[in-house]
Image (cartoon, rainbow, N blue to C red):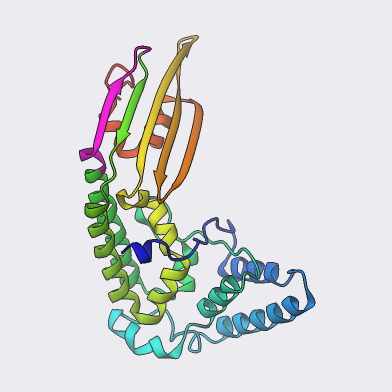
Amino acid sequence: MLAVLGVGAWLGRTYHNRGHEGRVGAAVRAAGDAGEEAGRAENRRLRAELAAARADPKAAGGGAGATTAGAGARAGEGYGALRTLIEVRRRKLANLEFEFFGDEAKLEPAFVELFEVSPSERAALEAAVDGARRKLDALLLENTKVSRTPKGDVAIAIRPFPAAGGAVYDAMLRTFADTLGSERYTAFLALGAEQAEKKLGRFGTAERTIQLSRESGDGDVRYRINDRSRWSERDNSNYSDYLTPERLAREMGPLVQVLPADFLPRW
């Protein structure tokens, strides 16, 4: 599992409000602006391959209407767009980024189109992500300790739970492997696994501390979050200020359940 956890840098920020043609075309055009002439020539070749993959769905993997059983049958035919993106990324010709996972375990259009996911496959994948999220939320609450500071702030300490979280991760990946088939699953590990890991809270591998404070003025209450996490010898900090109670609740996710009632009003 740990080997898979480190696979790939996620292609995370989407080119919003564009179709598949615009997102992929813009990304590959960006690759074409790389510095040296040799790089430009290579990028033009990759752009041509990507355009051919879009123009001929059969060459790119047989279309999006196949079922899970069909995924394995068409794996050998190749997925031209995915192969091209992986090649661009492997050669570090451009920083291509796409949003694959949205809120509430939904797959973004970029994922559905690039991986040629059928409606039944999409349902299976989203169910797997949603199931993993629910199990991780429960594990998160089980491993959370809440205390108050002398000033009345809220301190939250979250213990890592890598063994239990890893089991959830492995179960989700099995569904992705069974649903996508060999070639698309390999592409997912290269292009989307890191994003899924980040979206789902690193599957319990991070040690995390959160400090919450609030201030009142003119009858309004505003909150401040200082969220620090550490995993694999890396530290990450997020700071949010002047949050309304509603915004704080959204930012905290399942952890809103552990906040003292006198700190955050319930509605």
**Residue that appears at 53% across and 74% down:** 86
Residue 48, position in %: x, y? 66, 83
> What range of the chain is rendered magenta?
140-151
Q: Looking at the figure, which quarter contains the C terminus? A: top left
Position of residue 163 in the picture relative to residue 121 (left or right): left
Residue 17 location, quadrant = bottom right
Find the residue positioned furthest to the front. Answer: 233
In the foreground, 149 or 109: 149
Q: Is residue 136 above or below residue 37?
A: above
**Residue that appears at 46% across and 86% down:** 78
Residue 6, position in %: x, y? 42, 62
Q: Is residue 118 above or below residue 107?
A: below
**Residue that appears at 35% across and 71% down:** 119
Q: Looking at the figure, which quarter contains the N terminus? A: bottom left
Q: Is residue 265 above or below residue 112?
A: above
**Residue that appears at 29% across and 26% down:** 259
Residue 253, position in %: x, y? 34, 38
In the foreground, 5 or 52: 5
Position of residue 55 in the picture relative to residue 236 (left or right): right
Find the residue positioned furthest to the right. Answer: 37
Q: How many marks?
A: 0
Q: Is residue 149 magenta?
A: yes
Q: Is residue 95 magenta?
A: no
Residue 29, position in %: x, y? 69, 70
Q: Is residue 129 above or below residue 57?
A: above
